[in-house]
Image: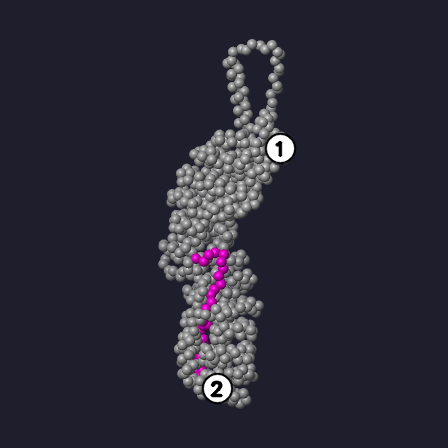
Amino acid sequence: MDADYANIPDDIEGFDALADLPLQSADEQTRMWQQQGQYMLSDSGIHSVMSGTSAPSVCSQPIGGSDELEAPWPSGPGHPGSVGAVEAAFPPSDLSGMLSPGTPLSSSGGTTNTPIPLDQGIGGPASNLTSIGGNFDEASDLADAASALPELVPLLEDEDPVVVGQASMMINQLSKTRPNLEIIINTPGMVEALVRSLDTAAPEPARWLAGTLHQMSQTPGGLAVIFKTGGVAALIRQLSSNIEVIQFYSITTLHNLLLYQDGAKEQVRECGGIPVIVGLLKKNNQKFLAICTDCLQLLSFRHPQTKLEICSAGGPVELVHILLNYNYEKLLWTTTRVLKVLSVCPESKVSVIRANGIDALTKHLTRAPHEPRGPNPSPRLLHNCLWTLRNLSDAATSQEIAGPLFERLINLLASSDHTVVSCSAGILSNLTCNNQKSKQQVCASGGIKALIEAIKRSNDQEDIIEPCVCALRHLTVRHDEACRAQESVRFFDGLSVLSRLFDVTTTLSVRKAIINLVRNLALCPGNCADLREKGVVAQLCGVLQSAYRDMQVAANGCPPETASGRIRASRCDDLAEACCGALQLLARDPDSRAALSQHCCQLLCQLLFLPTQTEAVPRAALGLLWELSSQQEVPNYLASHGVVLNRLAELAQHGTSEPCRQYAALLLQQQQQQQQAGSNSSNMMQNLLVEASPPLPMPTMPQQPPPPPQPPQHQQQMMYQQQGFQTLQHYPQPLQPQPQQQQYQRMPVSMGSYPMMQQQQQPPQYHHPGNNGNGYYTLPHHHGGHQQHQAWQQTSSSSGHSSGFASPMQHQHQQQHMYNMPHSMSGGHTPMFED
């Protein structure tokens, strides 16, 4: 604990000089104590010997130390949670105006100008007290005065209140000097007597006693003694006093205990201190409120039960009231620290939102240029407001957010402060998730351009890139202005920015967010050709190849990090699925489709054989294969690799998802039709050659009758048997069990083998949220001559996602993006920050 006090800003020279001086009169001593500016702060009320009045002490000076920090999110520049934060918040002279230097309050709440006479109640123990006081006044040095301290211990519990008051006053006088304070702390029974008398003393003696404990709390030894003697419970009881000075002494002493004494937080909780402190938030002294709110932050930090207790006591309502009605910066800062802690807990964040917390925090954000000018918040206050809003925003997606919040957040995206930009983008990402009105407000306020510019200025920092990309992903789908938003990305050079991001990002979550944004942009026909020209199609193929290698190595029991240095994540199946979905939409462009059919057919077939936890990757690969099947390269490749047809037959009959079975059956049907057409063409050519040849001489031996024609399914089966289902070398051998292979070699391939295809001849359709307000989205014709896609009605879902491709039925893998970060914004976890 000594290390915590290494930087105590004590005025050591002042104490040395004080020790060398002879004992002065009471008036001179009081004036000298008032001039001690660092350790002793202001006078603690020993003014009765001068003028019959007393001024209360003003504040406790924190003893070094630092705020607690939580590390789920790296602290950025200007993070307030650092060593000396409390010292900066509460300097010794800062709270000097918290209590007016007026007269002491009586027990009834009024004031009194009548001093306590030293000679009142002469007789019995009082005469001894007077003798001690006389010795104190006439002592030649402070050591002689301190020698009388043991005699004051029994007088603190005397039956005469006057004796108790005079003894309390003398002890408080001595506590003003560091040497005597140490003697008080070390005097046997002294602190115990102070604590016991605090509950039973009259208002004036209770004031001296509380002031003495306040002085003791500024030293390590004093904190330990107060804690061990049950001082925490006594101080909490004094918080309910109707005398403001006693309340202040008690809360500042508790504040020091919470900061520097181990075990004090638990004692405060056990003694019921939390509801009492919350009740003090109704006071109107802003500097007093600053200490109360800081105590609540220390108690609730990383303690869920305390957060719930604060909410049940009405804490969020009082905290929001402070934000709406006060302008004192330190009070606003400590209040937002409490709200930031509460915003981490799912239950308490709902209470903050219901208490109008979002509007209260919006009030203290930097104003937009077109708004009336007002005072700009300090950097630490702005950071706390943004961190709190980001933590609250994932629970406010269904709330109707006022326009000024979006305008101020968009304005903050142009800030040079890394933390401000990252938090602002994260809030926009969360609030635009599954909220059409919020999406339209952000688009109308210039959010598309601001997010793209923020990415350009990010210096390739992924904690800025990821929330910006996720916000753009939400803005480009599932609202009435989605088409215009998709075009705006291209207009503001967003496609070039996305193409460059593939080279500067490495984490899976960021890449997945970029790919999903590309998939949304591909819904606009005008973007497909530009994306191909920017090299996005080729980059998606490269990401898909890297993901396949990592999945292949993982299937062999090796960590995926060793397979690819570009993607450092163990789950690459989501990335492969996203790539296939984006490429399937981009394949509607003829040039892109031709390039993909030449270079990706083998890779897509390989994806069909990798074991995954779900069929998401095979389904996405089959969807892309079907889109490319209009190019002749795909049917030719399938026809020359029987093992692929075998896998398609397996998926068509035993696939767990209906879209997967449909895609596989359609590809097999296409193969059958092409081979039937090829067989008919061969017979026709043979007949033409026979007719054109001269007649041959009749053979001498009788001609055998020709065999009867075989039905198409037997021709297909014979073709498979002739091919022998040769296993390709580049397919993983363990993934193709031999018994199943033999089983499917004997299986006839015909339309009758797939009952669901007997009535539905349409190919699977893209299931993507519509771009208009009616919930319909009409897909273009298949470029390769397949039957026309029909308009379909968008399937609504309470947990629908804001972007992405799904199969004709309700996508089993719909993902709801919440920048709930945490641990990634597209992964569904939220980095919650308490400090």
Which residue is found at the position 40% from the left and 56% from the top? Answer: 417
User: Identity of the amino acid at label 1?
Assistant: Gln
Residue 147 appears anywhere in the view: yes
- Residue 106 position, x and y percent, is 49, 78
* Crowdedness near tag 2: few (<14), some (14–19) or many (≥20) residues, C-alpha within 10 Å: some
Q: What element carries label 1?
A: helix
Q: Earlier in the sequence, mark 1 or mark 2?
A: 2
- Residue 590 position, x and y percent, is 44, 33
- Reply above or below: 14 against 699: below
In this rendering, the count of numbered labels is: 2
Q: What number is the disc on residue 133?
A: 2
Q: Is the magenta stretch mostly helix, strand or loop?
A: loop
* Crowdedness near tag 1: few (<14), some (14–19) or many (≥20) residues, C-alpha within 10 Å: few
- Residue 235 position, x and y percent, is 53, 73
Which residue is found at the position 50% from the left and 80% from the top? Answer: 183
- Reply above or below: 88 against 505: below
Asked whether residue 73 is drawn in magenta, I would say yes
Pick whichever, 716 or 558, lies toward us.
558
Residue 339 appears anywhere in the view: no
User: Identity of the amino acid at label 2?
Assistant: Gly
Give the image quarter of residue 481: top left
Q: What number is the disc on residue 831?
A: none
Q: What number is the disc on residue 742?
A: 1
Q: Give the range drawn in magenta.
A: 48-76
Which mark lies nearer to you, 1 or 2?
1
Pick whichever, 205 or 551, lies toward us.
551
Is 16 positioned to the left or the right of 674 in the image? left
CA gap, disc 1 to disc 2? 109 Å
Q: Is mark 2 on a helix, strand or loop?
A: helix
- Residue 285 position, x and y percent, is 45, 69
